[in-house]
């Protein structure tokens, strides 16, 4: 995608100017939208921190970051023991994203087939392949989602209104995005599309990331509090709810950023379609009932108690929102049951929960 | 209620040390929870500003503030023309709260019956009466709500979990509160009660006000993002949703802080009771279908784009959350349709929407 007229992906390999060794460049998403900072990741520990602190976030990007993390580890020690240990560290860095586990399994199964001396170079090329496939998948998601939007009768003749939660744009992937891919495709095809952007507390990925990348691409959008979406649906100001997902279960339950479930309930109550857009590796066939089977990540309560923003002096500042005598809780994801899900948009097509198994066979 | 071991109401009359004239003291709620500041209101224009800028907020308190606003106006000019003009200014200061209109009508109908010379003193005593009645009503709401909680079978033997949205505590009223009245009554009666406090973006009245007043009273509570409530209900961690309301329609629709509708949907989806606690003047018998008949206040988008909190240097700072190239929208209230409402708790008892007319007759 384009930032300040230059094309970027969210992650890419590069050579260190100092050591001449391979490194990984990422965009530090904790600084957006106020600062556009590129960070160099030189080793496994740094990648682990980047995932944990959400400098990289978004299920597909976490998968790519984990693959590169394993490449960085292989560069140090490509023994099976070391690679398994590295994979375990990366696996524990974020518990919910299925892509992370998927990418690590794919990398390990490839690497352990070849002699130890060949593993580092194979790891770099396989991580690159994971990234390239992500981009192709997302472009296909964009086309399938665009077709859905073109079939849907908008409530207003002037504009097609999509509501999205969190960030499932190019910043959540290697490029293009998942939930935002159909929106970019529609905008680029000349369709008048407007996006209601849930700010997505506590980490505000909507206000910080989705708004920023939509603005960079010139897509009309309006940031709202997470509380507003139901009211907008009641008022006929939403045509479709379109989100990403960290995991989709085999029966079509959608595990996504906390609050998604509330928007799905409101869409259902107002007769509006609710879609999750994901690359097919995000579908976890080992899970059927996500509500009982998926562990929900509990993040630190300080993400609720404090918030970071741009102070009047131009610096990034964190301010306290909650009185110090009050405790906070911070579940990071929720589960939208399949009964509230109109369909899952994948690179292989759009599938209702009842027909989701077809996505596996396709 | 008690703050720092001293009893306060949210609004009270006082004599100006300088002029010897009657004034009104309020707590500046825009400074809470970080600063406890008492502000003196000397005239109608200052009261209008206090309501508009939400130094006083909460439907019952707005009614009391409007009554005192009219007393301040009567002190300057008690002619019918002047009082009607003052009432109109106050009426327009917040469009949603029915109590405001109710209090102004009550005041005007009393004042215009007596000679002009008697109006100012009558206005002060009538405003005081409105405040005293509010406190008595809220105490009755507390007892009716407590009985409901005692009848309800909690999911855990250890604690009764209530989820609340925005602030309908003593800060939203003259004293005691509406939605929090049953919680204080339960806590004071020795019941183990815990409150999930929605932070309630964009103005964060939950994190700023509800958390603060619960902490002052010693009631266990946890602040959560507005996105988290549905998940907590799915996990069996909520026994009851209990909110206030700015207006309840004759058929039982609940107009309350934006986002209430989403919590009502989640309560309904999880088979949990959803109650609104209001003094009976909050029921607007002139409105039947709130969705089509109530105008929703649109507040400034900067309330979404910026947030105020306590900086590390101890000062209150506003920081920007949304990139400057992105627009924002800020509907302040939404409507929860009566079909999602278990009951309305009033000072006259608890009424299901179908039996709400009995509250009028009671």
Image (tube, coloured by chain):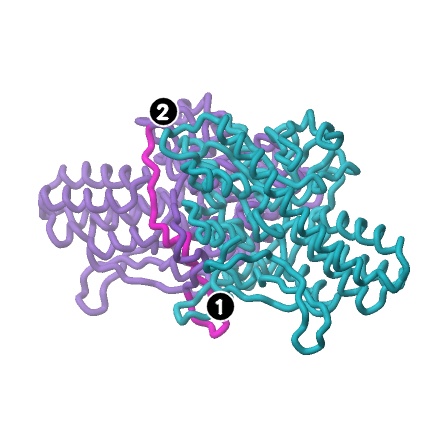
Chain colours: A cyan, B purple
Using the rendered image of the protein, determine whether residue B187 is visible from the camera's viewpoint.
Answer: no
Q: Which residues are magenta?
A: B293-317
Q: Which residue is mark 1?
A: A317
The image shows residue A317, relative to residue A88, as above or below, that is: below
Q: Residues within 10 Å of mark 1 (few under 14, many from 20)?
A: some
Assign a secondary structure to mark 1.
strand
Residue at the image position 45 percent from the left and 34 percent from the top: A238
Q: Residues within 10 Å of mark 2 (few under 14, many from 20)?
A: some
User: Residue A120, how many percent across, how many down?
Assistant: 81, 63
User: Residue A12, how many percent across, how many down?
Assistant: 64, 60
Q: Residue B293 vs residue A206: left or right?
A: left
| Residue B297 belongs to magenta span | yes
Q: CA distance from mark 1 to mark 2?
A: 47 Å
Q: Residue furthest bottom?
A: A18
Front tag of 1 and 2? 1
- Which of the 4 quarters of the picture holds residue A190? top left
Residue at the image position 81 percent from the left and 57 percent from the top: A88
Asked whether A341 or A297 is in front, the reply is A341
Asked whether A41 or B15 is in front, the reply is A41
Pinpoint the chain carrying mark 1.
A
Residue at the image position 37 percent from the left and 64 percent from the top: B37
Q: Which residue is mark 2?
A: B288
User: Residue B276, how many percent across, how many down?
Assistant: 47, 36
Asked whether B66 or B12 is in front, the reply is B66
Q: Looking at the picture, do discs 1 and 2 lie on one chain?
A: no
User: Residue A72, how many percent across, how many down?
Assistant: 76, 65
Number of marks drawn: 2
Using the rendered image of the protein, determine whether residue B305 is visible from the camera's viewpoint.
Answer: yes
Assign a secondary structure to mark 2.
loop
Pinpoint the chain carrying mark 2.
B
Q: Residue A158 vs residue B276: left or right?
A: left
| Residue B6 belongs to magenta span | no
């Amino acid at each position: 995608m384009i930032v300040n007229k230059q094309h970027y992906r969210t992650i890419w390999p590069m050579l260190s100017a100092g050591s001449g060794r391979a490194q990984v460049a990422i965009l530090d998403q904790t600084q957006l939208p106020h600062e556009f900072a590129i960070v160099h990741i030189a080793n496994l520990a740094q990648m682990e921190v980047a995932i944990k602190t959400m400098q990289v976030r978004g299920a597909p990007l976490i998968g790519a970051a984990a693959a590169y993390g394993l490449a960085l580890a292989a560069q140090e020690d490509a023994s099976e023991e070391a690679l398994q240990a590295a994979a375990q560290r990366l696996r524990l860095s974020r518990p919910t994203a299925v892509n992370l586990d998927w990418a690590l399994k794919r990398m390990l199964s490839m690497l352990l087939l070849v002699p130890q001396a060949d593993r580092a170079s194979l790891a770099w090329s396989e991580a690159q392949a994971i990234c390239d496939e992500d981009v192709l998948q997302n472009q296909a998601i964009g086309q399938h989602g665009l077709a859905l939007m073109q079939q849907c009768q908008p409530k207003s003749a002037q504009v097609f209104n999509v509501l999205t939660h969190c960030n499932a744009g190019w910043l959540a992937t290697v490029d293009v995005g998942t939930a935002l891919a159909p929106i970019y495709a529609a905008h680029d095809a000349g369709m008048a599309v407007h996006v209601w952007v849930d700010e997505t507390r506590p980490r505000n990925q909507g206000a910080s990331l989705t708004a920023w990348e939509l603005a960079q691409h010139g897509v009309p959008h309006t940031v709202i509090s997470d509380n507003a979406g139901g009211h907008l649906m009641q008022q006929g100001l939403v045509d479709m709810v379109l989100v990403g997902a960290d995991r989709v279960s085999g029966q079509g339950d959608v595990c996504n950023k906390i609050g998604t479930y509330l928007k799905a309930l409101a869409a259902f109550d107002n007769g509006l379609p609710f879609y999750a857009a994901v690359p097919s590796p995000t579908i976890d066939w080992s899970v059927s009932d996500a509500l009982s089977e998926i562990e929900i990540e509990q993040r630190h309560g300080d993400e609720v108690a404090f918030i970071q923003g741009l102070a009047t002096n131009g610096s990034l500042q964190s301010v306290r929102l909650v009185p110090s005598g009050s405790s906070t809780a911070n579940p990071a994801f929720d589960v939208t049951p399949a009964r509230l899900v109109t369909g899952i948009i994948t690179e292989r097509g759009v599938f209702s929960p009842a027909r989701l198994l077809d996505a596996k066979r396709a």
